Image (spheres, rainbow, N blue to C red):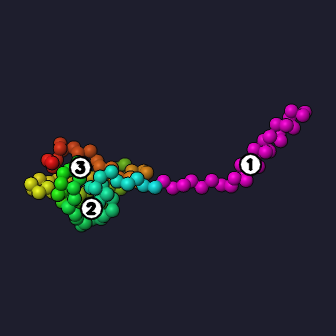
Amino acid sequence: MKRFQAVLAFCLLLTLTACWGGPQTPVPAQPKAPASPLLAFLSANEEGASATLDDPEFGEGVRVLVDGRFFSATGEECKRATLTAESREAEVVVACRQADGSWRLAPRIWGQGLSR
């Protein structure tokens, strides 16, 4: 009987301890900073925005024009942009927002694209 009372008192103590802590509100995840100048530009701008920037993956003096926004088949918010190099080469890129709020470039399916 004393063992039962001890277990009951312990369970009551655990319950009260959980109540005193109050409800735990999850801290919203902060979106990660984009890994490249191109991703930073795409994540911050809408259709029609343009800039010339240097990006390690695409080279120096690349002109970026945001073409528009759409939702992928998986429901991700995506933006399409046209990149133009000084050599008149062009490439279309797509960046999509992930569940954690960060942006990633879609795989480059047409080869290397712009030459650096």
In the image, residue 75 lies in the stretch drawn in magenta: no
For disc 2, the neighbor class at 10 Å (few under 14, some 14 to 19, many from 20) is: some
Question: What residue appears at the point 31 percent right and 57 percent down from the top-left corner?
Answer: 40
Quarter residue 80 falls in = bottom left
Pointer 1: what residue? 17
Amino acid type of the residue tagged 2 in the rendering: Gly
| Lateral position of residue 72 relative to residue 26, left or right | left
Residue 13: percent from the left, percent from the top?
79, 45
Name the secondary structure under disc 2: strand
Name the secondary structure under disc 3: loop
Pointer 3: what residue? 56
Total labels drawn: 3
Marks 2/1: CA–CA distance = 52 Å
Q: Nearer the viewer, mark 3 or mark 2?
A: 3
Pointer 2: what residue? 68
Q: Is residue 70 visible?
A: no
**Magenta residue span:** 1-29
Marks 3/2: CA–CA distance = 23 Å
Instruction: Please tell me whether residue 17 is drawn above or below residue 52 in the rendered image.
Output: above
Q: Are marks 1 and 3 in contact (CB under 8 Å)?
A: no
Q: Nearer the viewer, mark 1 or mark 3?
A: 3
